[in-house]
Image: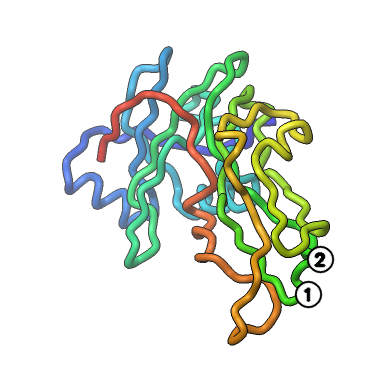
């Protein structure tokens, strides 16, 4: 089910107007799609961040633009790396009856058996490319690593049959493996680079469109 988000139109693209929207807590956006005329809009930053954190980056959003609703997905988000604030959002109107290509976060569950033997978990692929109907896109793909011993790995081909969506990565690509841990480290799971903040989301539906600031 789509989650609702209110939007307002932006009368022009002047820097002064854009700055005024940001000062009022709104994020400049662009709405576009194959059957939707591109238009500059703005959404409340707090409401949008809460929606992404609660529902996920790949959720279907019922975007209400001055009373007219559009079923959309987030195509792109620009974030100020210093302030960790949203700068711009691209919303792409989707056809709920047509499949889209997007990326979904990989979530590892369980503790690898090899960790108890002095091994360490190396998480190599953090997002998988999938193809699915918009309503069937999962918020994440769960991979159970509890049976992995030192030297074992899980490749894309090992989980394809477990998923309800089509995974388009190379079947031979390794998602996670258990390696021999260097002597100077304590046994345990190696932490990879931290996941992006919730506002940066998990993936992007593949669609064509123009960004406007």
Q: Relative to 184, is 70 above or below? A: above
Q: Which residue is mark 2?
A: 113
Q: Residue at x 52, y 49 (%)?
A: 201
Question: In the image, which disc is placed on residue 117?
Answer: 1
Query: Considering only vertical position in the picture, is 96 above or below 56?
Result: above
- Count the marks: 2
Q: Residue at x 52, y 22 (%)?
A: 94
Which residue appears at 60% of the width and 47% of the height?
Answer: 174
Compare residues 41 and 211 and report the one nearer the observer: 211
Q: Nearer the viewer, mark 2 or mark 1?
A: 1
Quadrant the C terminus occupies: top left
Give the camera-side residue of 156 and 201.
156
Identify the residue shown where x is 63% and y is 36%. Answer: 3
Q: Position of residue 51 (x, y in %)?
A: 58, 47
Q: Is the N terminus in the top left, top right, bottom left or bottom right quadrant? A: top right
Element type at mark 2 = helix
Tell me where residue 50 appears, x and y as whole percent.
57, 53
- Choose top left, top right, bottom left or bottom right for residue 96: top right
Crowding at dot 1, Cα within 10 Å, few <14 / some 14-19 / many 20+, comes out as some
The answer to whether residue 197 is left or right of residue 38 is right
Residue 70 in the image: x percent, y percent?
Answer: 51, 24
In 3D space, how far apart are the residues under numbered discs 2 and 1 (Cα atoms)?
Answer: 7 Å
- Mark 2 vs 1: CB contact within 8 A: yes
């Amino acid at each position: 089910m789509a989650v609702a988000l209110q939007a307002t139109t932006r009368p022009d693209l002047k820097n002064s107007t854009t700055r005024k929207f940001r000062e009022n807590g709104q994020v400049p956006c662009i709405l576009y799609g194959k059957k939707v005329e591109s238009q500059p809009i703005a959404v409340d930053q707090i409401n949008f961040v809460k929606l992404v954190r609660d529902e996920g980056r790949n959720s279907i959003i019922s975007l209400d633009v001055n009373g007219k609703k559009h079923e959309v997905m987030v195509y792109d988000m620009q974030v100020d790396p210093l302030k960790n604030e949203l700068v711009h959002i691209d919303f792409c109107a989707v056809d709920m009856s047509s499949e889209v290509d997007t990326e979904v976060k990989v979530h590892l569950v369980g503790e690898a058996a090899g960790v108890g033997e002095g091994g360490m978990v190396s998480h190599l692929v953090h997002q998988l490319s999938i193809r699915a109907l918009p309503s069937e896109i999962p918020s994440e793909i769960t991979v159970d690593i509890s049976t992995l011993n030192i030297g074992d790995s899980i490749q894309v081909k090992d989980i394809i049959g477990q998923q309800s969506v089509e995974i388009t990565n190379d079947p031979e690509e390794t998602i996670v493996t258990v390696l021999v841990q260097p002597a100077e480290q304590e046994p345990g799971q190696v932490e990879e680079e931290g996941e992006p903040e919730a506002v940066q989301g998990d993936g992007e539906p593949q669609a064509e469109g123009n960004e406007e600031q």
